[in-house]
Amino acid sequence: MNEEITYESALQELQDILKKLESGEISLDEITENVKRATFLLGFCQKKLRALESDLDQLLETEE
Amino acid sequence: MENQLSLLEFNQVIKGVLQDHLNNYYWVISEIASLQVNHSGHCYLELVQKEDQKIVAKSRATIWSSQYASISTEFEMATGESLKQGMHILSCISVNFHEVYGLSYNVVRIDPRFTLGERARNRKEIIDRLTREGLVDQNGSLDFPLVPQSVAIISSPTAAGYEDFLNQISHNPYGYAFYTKTFPAILQGNEASDSIISALNNIIDEIEYFDCVVIIRGGGSQIDLDCFDNYDLAVEIACFPIPILTGIGHQRDDTVADLVAHKKLKTPTATADFLLDHFRSYEEDIMDIYNQIGDFTRLFISKGLESLGKYPIKILKHSGSILENNKRKLDLYAEKLKNNSEKNLRIHQHQLEVIAEQIKKHDPYKILQRGYTMTTIDGKPLKKGSKITEGTVMNTESAWFTITSEVKTTKNKNNE
């Protein structure tokens, strides 16, 4: 994945995929691809949040 | 030439007349035109009365050193001012005539209440005028800078209060940095007002560098505050374009300068604390915002993680259900396929059975059963055009017999 992803765009895409899955408007052939992508995006978002949390802890600790 | 008197006798006559006709003392209102204390501690006064700025009476008077210390101390305690030129006083004077030194006025008491009243009246007149001119709150209405970092100091650099102020701000426990510039001025006595005004004018020349001005004076000194009850100085302070703080170290009622300043602090140290409080309050605000950012971010993270946590279940649920649906469809297709195939099979079987039945109906053996025979020559059915001659051997099949025969005669039939 060389594309530039932001947390916001990843979350949006994740929601879009979920919406497609919820509505069932997705072909069987696409499911694997979509679930794979959703898993990747999910991991990306979680990683980003955890990194932010750790940065924050470090910053606040330094200040204290 | 009768009644000739010696000078001593003459002076004694005068002394006697004065003693006979004058009270022991008189309370006299006057203005101090000049005041000098000599090395022995005697105080020499020149007292005047003016009408329309013109002197209409003038006398010398003395306060002997034995009394001057207590009179001046009592006066300063009561008024916050030392006796000085220009002051209106109510003094208790005894008149003496000495044969050698002549007439003299000795001041034995001064009532400070009179001077206080005079000062209060003067002060009230100035305040009333400033109020009429709308100047009292003018400097006070300026916004005080959030971080008053560059401070113009008007003070006497030798004053103790000046040192107190600098120490307080430069050794503050928070490590805040101040930039100060001192504009020296005289802060007591008759020249003080003009000196302070001149310092303010000097600040105006570099006003863009300063956040505020402080006027500070030696801590503990309680006297000579009249210079701060000056109309011209009050106007300068009121109209000054940046806030002015006063910390002139006194406990009495506010001076006019205090009244028109942005804020009056009791001492130079309190003035420094006021500035530090602004820094501190700003820093606290910043820290609050900083902490709020931290809190909001944590909340954002925890909400984000919580909401992300639902995705795997939802994705699994929905993709699973799509798979399930498709599987069900497939099963349905398989079922239909199976059902349809069997149906087709049965149809074909039936057709076959019908055909078989029909075929069965046309079976030659069935015909033979009815008494017909079938003849073949060399295994071939006997047909039109078959060559039959005498002696040709024929096989005849009936339902019950197989007959081999030899042809004796033949005769062609004309029927087609």
Image (cartoon, rainbow, N blue to C red):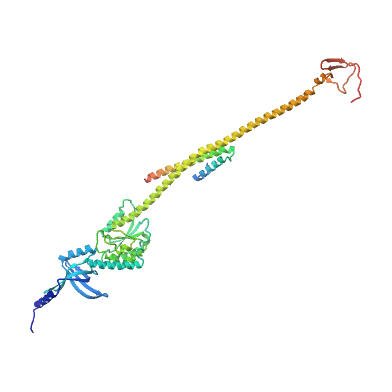
What x and y, as percent, mark residue B386? 87, 21
Q: Is residue B165 visible?
A: no
User: Which residue occupies the foreground of this view, A21 or B213?
Assistant: A21
In the depicted structure, whether residue B52 falls above or below residue B255 = below
Q: Is residue B396 left or right of residue B5?
A: right
Q: Where is residue A54 in the image (x, y as percent from the top left)?
A: 42, 42
> Does residue B278 appear left or right of residue B101 in this picture?
right
Q: Residue shown at 81%/19% (left/top)?
A: B369
Position of the C terminus of chain A by quadrant = top left
Residue B346: image quadrant is: top right
**Is B295 left or right of A8, judged from the image as shown?**
left
Give the x, y percent position of residue B391. 89, 16
* Observer able to see residue B116: yes
Circle count: 0
Q: Quadrant of residue B217?
A: bottom left
Along the line of sight, which residue is nearer the eye, B160 or A15?
A15
Q: Nearer the viewer, residue B331 or B235?
A: B331
Residue B17 placement, left or right of B342: left
User: Which of the 4 image quadrants contains residue B144?
Assistant: bottom left
Image vertical order of residue B130 relative to residue B326, above or below = below
